[in-house]
Amino acid sequence: MKSLARVDHAFGSHVIFDRASVDLPDRGVVALRGPNGCGKTTLLKLLGGMISTSCTEIARWRKDFTAVYLDTDFLTLDYLTVEEHLDMVRPLIGPSEMPEGDGHHLLTEQMMPTKVADLSLGQRQRLVLTVALALKNVDVLLLDEPLNGLDQQGSLVARQSMLAVGRSRLILVATHEDDHWTDYDLAVRQKDTIELRPTGARK
Ligand SMILES: Nc1ncnc2c1ncn2[C@@H]1O[C@H](COP(=O)(O)OP(=O)(O)OP(=O)(O)O)[C@@H](O)[C@H]1O
């Protein structure tokens, strides 16, 4: 477990976090929860280095861990087909197979010749998640609402893939889903209160 003792962030005069402490387990899947505008994306982007910060706790944490923030635009080049995209990112991915859950992959054969620009939201999420979960040399994946747009089967496969990858890495998932399928919930309650709690959901 790593604890970031004091996380502060403001956009101008709009204070998002004020001396919040954030506990992060070493591995597992963590659902980052809280109402619209409470700062979930901001926290992911701070941890991923997408927003600059003078917060020394975060700077120290980022020295110890390689963390990557991913949303639907992650490494996607619209003019490539899915197949070409996978070839492009191949050097970034480990030797193991693309993650799968329930015997299924997130990518379908039908998607392969399709240009990234022509993918539906759910198909794009499938591509981003597939690449994200296979990235090598990354300790922490910061995923912003990765299940958005996925159909029921896609969502099931994605959850199982995340839980499988979460055995060896930390995955933070900003989500508004009601069900508690992850290993932990990390709830943004107030500007200064972010609570981590195990869910006991993993079988
Ligand atoms: N670049 C920015 N400049 C100014 N204000 C910002 C910026 N990014 C976010 N905010 C504000 O910070 C607050 C937190 O935004 P954030 O996107 O982190 O919330 P969230 O919890 O992810 O919300 P949602 O559940 O709607 O996705 C919001 O009030 C938002 O308007």
Image: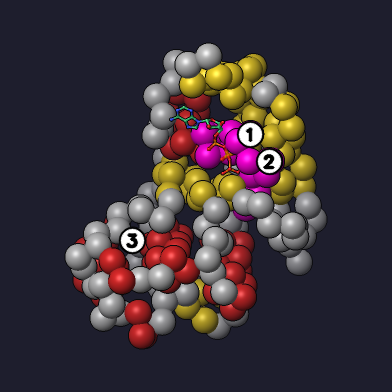
Q: Is residue 33 shown in magenta?
A: yes
Q: Which residue is disc 1 drawn over?
A: 38
Q: Amino acid at mark 1?
A: Cys
Q: Is mark 2 within 8 Å of ligand 1?
A: yes
- Residue at image position (61%, 62%) is 163
- C-alpha gap between disc 1 and disc 2: 6 Å
In the drawing, does residue 79 fall left or right of residue 116?
left
In the drawing, does residue 159 fall left or right of residue 110?
right
Dot 2 lies on which element? loop
- Residue at image position (55%, 83%) is 103
Residues tagged 3 and 2 counted as in contact (Cβ below 8 A): no
Label 3 packing within 10 angstroms: few (<14), some (14-19), many (20+) = some
Q: Which mark is residue 35?
A: 2
- C-alpha gap between disc 3 and disc 2: 34 Å
Dot 1 lies on which element? loop
- Residue at image position (30%, 54%) is 75
Q: Earlier in the sequence, mark 1 or mark 3?
A: 1
- C-alpha gap between disc 1 and disc 3: 33 Å
Q: Which residue is disc 3 drawn over?
A: 93
In the drawing, does residue 99 fall left or right of residue 202?
left
Relative to 93, does residue 118 appear above or below in the rendering? below
Q: Amino acid at mark 3?
A: Ile
Q: Is mark 1 within 8 Å of ligand 1?
A: yes
Magenta stretch, residue numbers: 27-43
Q: Quadrant of the C terminus?
A: bottom right
Relative to 143, does residue 113 appear above or below in the rendering? below
Query: In x, y percent, where is residue 3?
Result: 64, 28
